Amino acid sequence: MPKIPFPKKKAAKEVAAEELAILERTYPRAVTALDYRNPFELLIAVILSAQCTDARVNMTTPSLFAKYPDAKKLAKAQQEDVEKIVKSCGFFRAKARNIINCAKALVEHHGGEVPREREQLEALAGVGRKTANVVMSVAFEEAAIAVDTHVFRVAHRLGLTLGKTPRDVENDLQAAVPREKWRHAHHWLILHGRAVCKAPVPLCGVCPLNGICPTPKIIAKSLGARSRPGAAAAAAPRPARRASTKKKA
């Protein structure tokens, strides 16, 4: 099936509110899937989770934290040793370098503790806005919305945003979700993206938002266009013309 296009207009404010209410009821205990015991472990786990599944990270971090339980220990680690532990997470050389440098900065500038402020978090190696938002919202229960690939996809399919960038999507979600629920909302969208609104094909038939989400209509229209008589023939490439054997005058 070809890539499903996103809706071209945002859902009405009332529809968006209903969609979010359904998600909240569907995932009332939504939390991060990453295993952690403190802000330091969460920060390192989120850095490792870039382009990697949370399940894989959870298989990796116990060995990592057994050897390097805090920022002081990790800051003194040899990169080759860390690479061996995090290799299965992908991009292991860059990730090993980032988490060691992140730990060094925590020791040098923050007494080994993870800061709560966005600016200080984003100054750490391997930490961008999404990672900072995860740490702020999960570890410190601050109002923040993290936009990963699941959030980006599901928010678009529901018509909650037309944003071209993660920051645009974050801004639209902040406008649609009450501030006191920001730190929960991205978990609703992540869990829904993993369980139902999957890439590349969502499971619309079992989706609790099927009746109000704009994407099922887009899928039906796309399938209908492809199933019309002559549609396949019209879409098929035309055979190349045979070159003329007549000589030019």
Image (cartoon, rainbow, N blue to C red):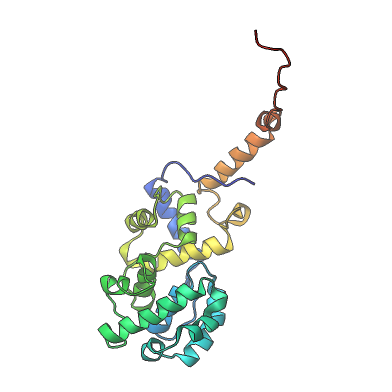
The residue under the point 40% across, 54% down is 17
Q: Is residue 203 left or right of residue 147?
A: right
The residue under the point 26% across, 70% down is 119
- Comparing 77 with 225, the one in front is 77
How many numbered markers are drawn?
0
The answer to whether one can see residue 32 in this image is no
Single out the residue that lies furthest toward the top: 249
Screen quadrant of the C terminus: top right
- Comparing 139 with 54, the one in front is 54
Give residue 56's quadrant in the image: bottom right
Name the spot of residue 170 as percent of width and height, x first: 36, 58
- Comparing 236 with 94, the one in front is 94
Name the spot of residue 159 as percent of width and height, x first: 44, 48
Q: Is residue 109 left or right of residue 43?
A: left
- Comparing 188 with 225, the one in front is 225
Q: Is residue 145 left or right of residue 59?
A: left
The residue under the point 63% across, 53% down is 205
Name the spot of residue 51 as percent of width and height, x first: 51, 66
Location of residue 62 with respect to 151 vertically, above or below: below
Q: Is residue 89 left or right of residue 146?
A: right
Location of residue 209 with respect to 102 vertically, above or below: above
The answer to whether one can see residue 115 in this image is yes
Give residue 167's quadrant in the image: bottom left
Name the spot of residue 29 as percent of width and height, x first: 48, 73
